Image (spheres, rainbow, N blue to C red):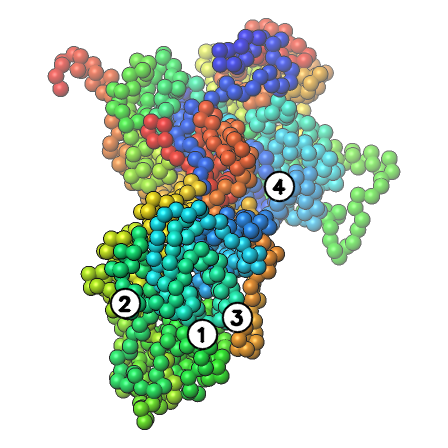
Amino acid sequence: MTTSEKLLTGNEAAAWGAARAGAEVVAAYPITPQTTIIETLASLVHRGISKAEYIAVESEHSAMAACIAAAHTGARAFTATSSQGLALMHELMHWAAAARLPVVLANVNRAMAPGWSIWTDQNDSLSQRDTGWIQIYCVDNQEVVDSVIQAFALAARTSLPVMVVLDAFVLSHTAEAVHIPEEEEVRPLIPEWNAPWKIDIDRPAALGSLVPPAEYEKMRKKLCDAHAQAALVIEDLAATWRKRFGRGAGLIESYRAEGAETILVTSATIASTARVVIDELRDKGVPAGLVRVRVFRPFPVAALRGALAGAKRVVVLDRNCSYGASGIFYQELRAALCGVPGAPVVHGYIAGMGGRDVTPLTVRAALGRAMEGEAPVPESTWLSE
Amino acid sequence: MPRLPDGRYRFDSLEELPPVAVSLGSTAWNRTGDWRSREPVFADQRPPCTHGCPTEQDIVDQLRLCAQGRIREAGELLLSANPFPATTGRVCPHPCTASCNRGQMDGVVDIPGVEAAIGDELISDGFVPARRPRVGGRVAVVGAGPAGMTAAHYLALAGLEVVLYDRDERPGGLLRTGIPPYRLPRRALDAEIDRALRCVEFVGQRALGRDLQLGTLKQEHDAVLVAVGRHAPRPLGLEGEGSGGVHDGLGLLAELHRGQPAPAGKRVVVIGGGNTAMDCARSLLRAGRSVGVFYRRDRASMPAFVDEVEEALEEGVKIEEWVLPEALLLEGGKVRAIRFVRARPGAPDSSGRPRPEPIPSSGFVVEADLVVVAAGEVLDAGPFEKSLLTGGFVAADATLETRMPGVWASGDCLGGGGTVAEAIAQGRRTAAAIARKLGVAGPEPDLLAARGAGADVIGFDRIRPHYFAAVPAVPRSKIDVQSRLGGGEVRVALAHAQASAAAVRCLSCGTCTGCDNCFQFCPDQAVVRDAPGRYRADVARCKGCGICVTECPRGACVLHDLGENG
Amino acid sequence: MPRSTLGGEVEVRLHGRGGQGTVVASLVLARAAMIEGKSVQAFPEFGVERRGAPVTAFLRVGPEKIRVRSKVYRPDHVLVLDRQLIPLVELPADHGGWFVANTPSEPAGLSSLPASWRPATIDATRLARAHGLGSGALPVVNCPMAAAFARITGIVGLDALLQAIRETVPQKPDANAAAAQEAWGTVAAAPTWEQDALQRAFGGS
């Protein structure tokens, strides 16, 4: 253990990340399993470690409204939520992105009710897919603290809101060793946000007025272009992290994927457990590898095409489902590979919904079934069936 | 789908599982009580007010009834512990409020104010408590002060024949002769005495040792109670204490309250720091004299009630601290001045307070033509055989029976703290003991225990203040000094509605109000409500989590450890 | 290069009741292992915690970064903080290690365990009461239990454990450390396999 490592849960790591990045306004409403993020932040504010103004609000909708207002003034705004709470923010999620505000949000992935559940799956955050937010899915608690800090830099550099996503309980309530960067190491990486639409009492302006169709369309195109720009910034930040701290992934992360015939594509903590399975297969001489999708928006089409080139088959393991279609990463990956000459066969599996435990056995089953020649189906195969 | 023996369902196939979360039965199969190592017990406990009150009134219940506007019922309950609420509400130093838990929130509940208001209401209502049918048995009570009157009252209500003797013409004892009307209006005192002694035969001008003998009384009655108080002044031990212009405090007050004019003398020196000293000082002030109180320790050490000292100062009484009287300076057989020496705190005495140590060469002379010695009272031991006394007071066992079987004692003649409430409490306890001895149903010695309350005194740690809306205490308005000196009552009594408003603030410490918090908060539906305000734990469901205890706003529910075998 | 997955990695399951400090026990052991330079992962059973209800926590300790993120299904050791839970703990019969339980019984009293599990016992409830931990009705036994577990399994040493207690436990760190030290000295274990074998082979003491 290095002296600067702490035993932290994922939620504590998220709070420390916001504090180290210099969050200036925190507005949040408690919800299991997110609550300990804002509890930790409240305590960090109380102890003077964070200088943020902590605003207790009466709903997630208000939390996002407060963050939007704060961000408009140039303050670094942070909130955290989960599941139904994120859904309640939905209207303002669109607003934050289209108003091009650098809000940072930590979402603890929790399954949507009913069928009341507090356990993890990705349908809450993936329901915000088309709002214009950047989405980063974390594999461990170290990545949580790093991603939250990077999110503030990324948001300020792109004028886009950033959502950092962590699995309920598997990260949120699991304690492991985390290195917390010092303030002076990371603050210089986060520029002041000084967009022309920042509220400034010396330059009075009206915001959010009626926009004619042609201009509206062009503004939306700019939002899309900002995501392309964000992909570059994400890789740039990853490079900085690798140089400075010797760790950190960018848009995607490959693990023993070189020369692999079969590549597992998955996200978040499943990718951690999956490494153990890849090692077992490689030890047996099976050419299998892993590609983790860390950033879901912007979707890393080019990076994935590159990482998967040469593979015979790709197995996508989704902890989510677009009902009536398929697993969402599966859907996105097929679209990314569509029309690529010599593209691999893509299998889609769904597992771990509502917090169902994903063990090495689960991962082995997905890879095994695909390698044994099970035909891919367009609507994904539910592994439990 | 198969149903398991314990009532649960098992889904063997996807078809069997309903598409949504819908209950098919109840969760009764889940015997969460099997996890239990503790269980809640729903039982009232002792509120700090009752714990602090010598008469152990059921204050919480009285306040509840009063808050509901049921003053008559509150009064009946009060009278079962104390026949003189209009009196004690005014003259008691109210130890009930000392640890009132509301004091740690937004100010203590005005318990004495409500008590006096209930007492006043009972008087104007003409309420009379019911007496049990006559039974055989004659009791003599000697001394018609608060202890004797209380005992006589409860014994009479129990159906016994009671004769109450006093050396004075009228009953009341110290309440009448010692406490000035500006603290205790005579209409209230007279009305309460009339009601208390309604079924008692009172015989005045009979003094123990002179007109009455213990031995004879014992022969003529089934039980005798001695409650003669202590009236003999404790002398200062200075030469010339019998000279003109020198008076003892209690004697002076008695004369004043009988309507005699105040003795001559413009400049008054009162020696002492107790309530008698304060009453003398303030009474003489009202007679137009200039008064100084001279006390051998500091103000904070005075045995007088804090309120009394403060009021005396407001009215213009001067207080000199750390002074010891050294000599009376006489002229023609009358006092002219008094010489004091200054003192400083020395080693603590038996009471734990610093002993005043004279400072050499610090003497000074104070001109005075009227000196009142109020340095305490002792028992007039004359009428008692030596064998009945210990340390100058009447000796009694735990039931307050003296060493002469069949003779009990109560009140100040036993020594003790000397408050009216303590005298009343002892009067009720002896009445209970005598009634028990004579085989009749007497007053309840412990009202809270009688209604099943436990012995835990509920401190603020057991109160959940967030359940109580802030309702600031209404300060009782005081009458300005000028009008006070005119002779009226010093403090304004609470009117009916004000008393209810004050009573609403009671937290009901340790006393279930049926708020249903335990019932509502239990996560396992393990709190069973048998009737409003009557709860018990269903042991099949209660897992001992203690949420009911945590959420009880007032400590009326405790967790019991079931131990290793739970 | 990637390393073998379970080389030297130890998986532990802790069983207690909500309010006894089960999760904190896992954190104390994790922090102690971290102090000794090991890699750790500690987490509660992902459920809605209720006071008095059975609670499970998991702990993984290993020499390298721990990557498996599922629950522990085949524990190498088990720690039970509440004696009433002892009969309810499910143990794999084909895999085993130490079963360290809070009970006044001798280890031999836990006769119902599968043969692959070795019992060790300590009366941590008595220790907690003696050191004023928790309330009389609900003694908090996590620190003495963590110490007994560490002593028996050798998962961490006493120095690291005491330091971890002081850094982790929010209330009464000194009393908890004292109780842990006493537990370290008093936990009783059934004889080891080796001792058993020696006993069978040579008899006597």
Tag nearer the camera, 4 or 1: 1
Percent x, y of residue A40: 52, 42
**Same chain shared by disc 1 and disc 2:** yes
**Same chain shared by disc 4 and disc 1:** no
Tag nearer the camera, 4 or 3: 3
Real-space Cα separation, disc 2 to disc 4, in angstroms: 83 Å
**Within 10 angstroms of label 4, few (less than 14), some, or many (20 or more) residues?**
many
Q: Determine the residue positioned at 41% across, 81% down.
A: B292
Where is mark 2, residue-wise? B209
Mark 1 — on which chain does it sit?
B
Say whether residue C203 is visible.
yes
Say whether residue B151 is visible.
no
Q: Residue furthest bottom?
A: B332
Where is mark 1, residue-wise? B257
The kind of residue tagged 3 is: Val
Residue B419 appears left or right of A220: left
Where is mark 4, residue-wise? A28
Residue B490 numbered tag:
3
The kind of residue tagged 4 is: Ala
- The image shows residue B550, relative to residue C2, as above or below, that is below
SS at badge 2 = loop
**Same chain shared by disc 4 and disc 3:** no
Percent x, y of residue A325: 70, 16
SS at badge 4 = strand
The kind of residue tagged 1 is: His
The kind of residue tagged 2 is: Gly
Which quadrant of the figure has residue A79?
top right
